Image (spheres, rainbow, N blue to C red):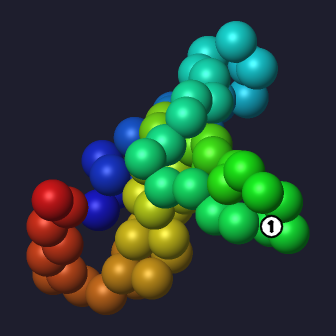
């Protein structure tokens, strides 16, 4: 988990730079009181970092924890 925690921290440092990753259109759209649906935009790198951070915080203190990310 120590290596994973380091990877999470390293990715977080990279993402502090606004030019490191960008937001892009996603497949999903929602209706928000308009005639035309609005596209939900996503930042894949930021989403991955948030997920990795959650895994680290949730399972990082468990000895012998095994987590598979698919």
Let me know if residue 8 appears in the view. no
Residue furthest front in the image? 35
Point out the image quarter for the C terminus: bottom left
At which x and y percent is residue 68? 14, 67
At which x and y percent is residue 20? 62, 16
| Quarter of image, res 30 | bottom right
At which x and y percent is residue 17? 74, 19
At which x and y percent is residue 23? 63, 30
SS for dot 1: loop
At 85% across and 69% down in the image, what residue appears? 33
For label 1, the residue is 32
Task: Tell how many labels.
Answer: 1
Let me know if residue 37 appears in the view. yes
Horizontal side of 60 relative to 67 (left or right) equals right
Observer-nearest of 52 and 33: 33
At 32% across and 52% down in the image, what residue appears? 4
Residue furthest bottom in the image? 62
| Quarter of image, res 60 | bottom left
At 57% across and 56% down in the image, what residue appears? 29
Q: Residues within 10 Å of mark 1 (few under 14, many from 20)?
A: few
Observer-nearest of 42 and 29: 29
Residue furthest right in the image? 33
Can you say whether 64 is above or below 25 in the image?
below
Observer-nearest of 30 and 19: 30
| Quarter of image, res 69 | bottom left
Point out the image quarter for the N terminus: bottom left
């Amino acid at each position: 988990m120590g290596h994973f925690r380091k990877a999470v921290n390293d990715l977080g440092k990279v993402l502090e730079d606004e030019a490191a990753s960008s937001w892009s259109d996603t497949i999903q759209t929602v209706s928000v009181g308009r005639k035309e649906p609005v596209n939900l935009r996503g930042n894949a790198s930021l989403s991955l970092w948030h997920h990795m951070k959650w895994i680290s915080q949730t399972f990082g203190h468990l000895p012998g924890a095994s987590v598979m990310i698919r």
